[in-house]
Amino acid sequence: MDREFMEYDVVIVGAGPAGLSSAIKLKQLAQDNDSEISVCVLEKGAEVGSHILSGNVLDPCAINELFPNWKDLDAPLNVPVKEDSFLVLTKNKSFKIPSFLLPPLMNNHGNYAISLGNLCRWLGVQAENLGVEIYPGFSAAEILYDDKGAVKGVITGDMGVGKDGNNTDRYMPGMELRGKYTFFAEGVRGSLSKKIIKQFSLDKESCPQKYAIGIKELWEIDPKNHKPGLVLHTQGWPLSKGASGGSWMYHLDKNQVSVGFVVNLDYKNPYLSPYEEFQRFKLHPSIKGFFENAKRISYGARAINEGGLQSIPKLVFPGGCLIGCSAGFVNVPRIKGTHNAMKTGMLAAEAAFKEISKNPENPSALISEYDNSWKSSFVWKDLWKVRNVKPGLKWGIFLGNIHAGLNMWLNDLGLGFLVPY
């Protein structure tokens, strides 16, 4: 089929933290070097941020690099973390783990409780102000390859197809978006990212990826129960033997609370319902008081990469790369991946810009520098410290937590060489 097409230097699939950060960085580099670079971002949601589930504790290290003046630009980082609390739950009681026993990397002071959707909307505005073209409401349905097998862009989804699969009178074929490089920033288990990983055997030398499901809700609670800046995590009940996971509760501004429950998808009981476990959790004596006279205003769920450092595939392939959770940069014990997603997008942008600057008309097919630069960045260090936490859960919650705590303390004390890889 002959399709209309548009050509760019870089095509980015996904307007999440990774995709938007890479687009912004490309434009910043062009400005700094008095040059031009064309960047397009595809977003399947109706608007930027619409597919981002609210509630996040953000480590600001990446946004500090991308926008050192983010406060002057009114970035939606309004609630600094003021109180950190970690509880172990039994059916009717809870036990607080003293902060001094937790490894320093688990400390959230200096971070911000935010709406990640609002952050992405803000990043989208910054990107468009720099000249990035963002197309919300368009999904990337197919991958384009050139005669040598390198990726040369994507095709957007056809529109006007009936539920029977036949074209209606409103049919409109998808458009080709061609780029010298294509960044896949679809998030966990992105449909095209999975094809790319298989096509180029990017996971040949990595461990299989592991997954969890995270169920999230946003509540507006009674002001008397609201503690802006409170970050609460729990482990234990209601999950029983053979299942693992935990919860979070982040007190945002405007009397809003993000609450969520994560269940690792290796649970042994096939009848376990993560959603029902979440409902039970909210009825625990230490938790239910927060929801008295409260109103749930939104909800959703998403998959989470949990394989960590060992499961990250090779990131580059002819014609493009994987960034953010398309590759899996979540720090599981910290329940944080946004800072790593943003940084990998920025590193990919730097590597691609360098190759395009060398040869604007025909840059190298591989942006190899990116596959090396992330390993010397804080992303690698962040994941290396917790590389043995997830594997230790095979011994259960109690022994797994002891193993995890010992591992993280040794790494924070600079004694990581005592911990096997």
Image (cartoon, grey):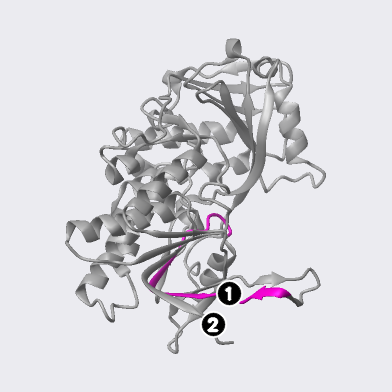
- Residue ID for mark 2: 3
Quick one: label 2, few (<14), some, or many (20+) residues within 10 Å?
few
Query: Marks 2 and 1: in contact by CB < 8 Å?
Result: yes
Above-or-below relation of 147 to 160:
below
Q: Position of residue 72 (x, y in %)?
A: 28, 33
> Would you say 125 lies left or right of 195 here?
left
The magenta span reads 169-189
Which mark sits nearer the N-terminus, 1 or 2? 2
Residue 174: give its label.
Answer: 1
Query: Is residue 340 something one can see in this rendering?
Result: no
The quarter of the picture where residue 256 lies is: top right
Kind of residue sitting beneath label 1: Gly
Q: How many marks?
A: 2
Above-or-below relation of 181 to 347:
below
Q: Position of residue 60 (x, y in %)?
A: 36, 37
Quick one: label 1, few (<14), some, or many (20+) residues within 10 Å?
many
Q: Position of residue 20 (x, y in %)?
A: 41, 53
Per the image, label 2 sits on a secondary structure element best described as loop
Of the pair 381 and 408, the residue shown nearer to us: 381
Of the pair 198 and 35, the residue shown nearer to us: 35
Q: Position of residue 109 (x, y in %)?
A: 39, 25
For the residues marked 1 and 2, what is the alpha-carbon distance in whole angstroms?
7 Å
Quarter of the figure with the N terminus: bottom right
Residue at 54% over, 82% down: 3
Above-or-below relation of 133 to 52:
below
Magenta-span inclusion, residue 319: no
Residue furthest to the top in view is: 224
Residue at 56% over, 38% down: 54
Query: Is residue 351 something one can see in this rendering?
Result: yes
